[in-house]
Image (tube, rainbow, N blue to C red):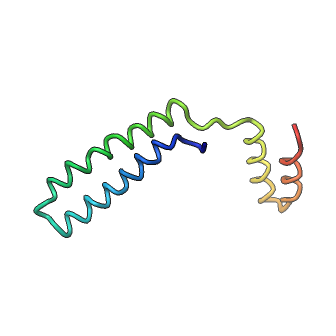
Amino acid sequence: MGFSPRILGVLLIAAGCGYLAESLTSLLLPSCEHVVGRITDIPLTLGEPATILWLLIRGAKVGSRTIECIELRALASLTGDEHVAEAECHRPG
């Protein structure tokens, strides 16, 4: 299992295909734009709001240890001490 549920990924892929179909239809078949627009609205209205709600409710849970490592790596990139930051981040505890 990854960061988000599989169904959200599927819905977002369908939404992306819907955007592509809607854009190409307006260029290639302008007479069918209304029909394709109504069909592509289904994945658009399901995928995007569901992902937004999931991110708002569940979100990304980042621990304080992860934040410390991010800060150490950022500081190390400025000072040139990358090996010190890596050693600290891989230290247990």
Q: Residue furthest top?
A: 57
Residue 1, given in percent of the width and then of the height, sits at 60, 42
The residue at 51%/37% (across/down) is 55
- Residue 85 percent location from the top left of the image: 84, 52
Left or right relative to 72: residue 59: left
Query: In the shown orientation, is residue 77 left or right of residue 42?
Result: right
Q: Residue furthest bottom?
A: 28
Q: Looking at the picture, how far across and down is residue 20, in whole percent? A: 32, 61
Outermost residue toward the left? 31
| Residue at horizontal 10 percent and vertical 62 percent from the top | 31
Using the rendered view, name the quadrant where residue 59 is placed: top right
68, 33: nearer the viewer: 33
Residue 58 located left or right of residue 38: right
Q: Nearer the viewer, residue 24 or 39?
A: 39
Give the camera-side residue of 29 and 65: 29
The image shows residue 28 at horizontal and vertical percentages of 19, 70
Q: How many marks?
A: 0
Which residue is painted at 43% across and 48% down in the image? 10
